[in-house]
């Protein structure tokens, strides 16, 4: 699906809202763990990501309300799994471009070191 052009205010608000949800570093790491491990309990996610159970629950709630993850009760525990793996494409695209920029910057510094003015 391509982005409609010109971008309407309504579309910009929805896309911006989704990107805002995905942009938090803890949420990026939570999504990564869920992608690698499948269904995981809140306490396991918190431990693996290095946040409190409370913080993990708050972030997972945001991801759940926006359809990125789904939850399932298992006794007293709540387990989460990734519901929308398309978010990984966003992360991969951003990481790919960052690697390119780092490579370009290194190349520029190497050129400058070889050809001082």
Image (cartoon, helix red, strand yellow):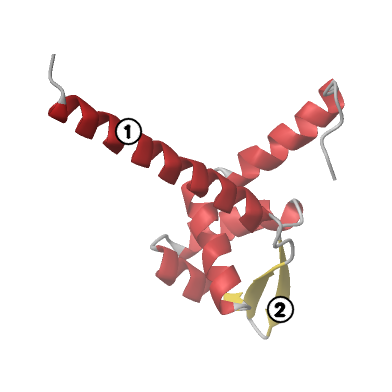
For marks 1 and 2, give the one nearer the viewer.
1
Label 1 CA crowd tier, 10 Å (few <14, some 14–19, many 20+): few
- N-term-proximal mark, 1 vs 2: 2
Task: Between residue 22 and residue 94, name the one nearer to us.
Answer: 94
| Location of mark 1 (residue) | 105
Query: Which percent across, then down, holds residue 34?
Result: 58, 70
Give the Cα separation between the discs numbered 1 and 2. 48 Å
Residue 89 shown left or right of residue 24 in the figure: right
Q: Quadrant of the N terminus?
A: top right
Residue at image location 53% in from the left, 64% down from the top: 32
| Secondary-structure class at tag 1 | helix
Task: Between residue 69 and residue 99, name the one nearer to us.
Answer: 99
Q: Is residue 24 visible?
A: no
| Location of mark 2 (residue) | 73
Q: Compared to 112, does 92 lie above or below?
A: below
Q: Residue furthest bottom?
A: 75
Task: Between residue 33 and residue 101, name the one nearer to us.
Answer: 101
Label 2 CA crowd tier, 10 Å (few <14, some 14–19, many 20+): few
Circle count: 2
Query: Which percent across, then down, holds residue 104?
Result: 37, 35
Q: Is residue 86 visible?
A: yes
Question: For residue 116, what is the image quadrant?
Answer: top left
Query: Which percent across, then down, holds residue 3?
Result: 82, 35
Residue 103 shown left or right of residue 46 in the figure: left
Indicate which disc residue 63 carries: none
| Secondary-structure class at tag 2 | strand
Residue at image location 61% in from the left, 47% down from the top: 22
Q: Residue furthest front?
A: 115
Residue at image location 13% in from the left, 13% down from the top: 117
């Amino acid at each position: 699906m391509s982005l409609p052009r010109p971008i309407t205010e309504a579309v910009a608000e929805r896309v911006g809202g989704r990107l805002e949800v995905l942009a938090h570093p803890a949420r990026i790491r939570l999504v990564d763990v869920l992608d690698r491990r499948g269904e995981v309990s809140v306490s396991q996610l918190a431990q693996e990501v290095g946040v409190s159970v409370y913080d993990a629950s708050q972030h997972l709630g945001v991801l759940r309300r926006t359809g990125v993850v789904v939850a399932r009760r298992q006794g007293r525990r709540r387990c989460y799994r990734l519901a929308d793996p398309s978010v990984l494409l966003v992360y991969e695209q951003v990481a790919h471009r960052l690697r390119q920029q780092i490579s370009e910057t290194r190349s520029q510094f190497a050129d400058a070191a070889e050809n001082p003015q």
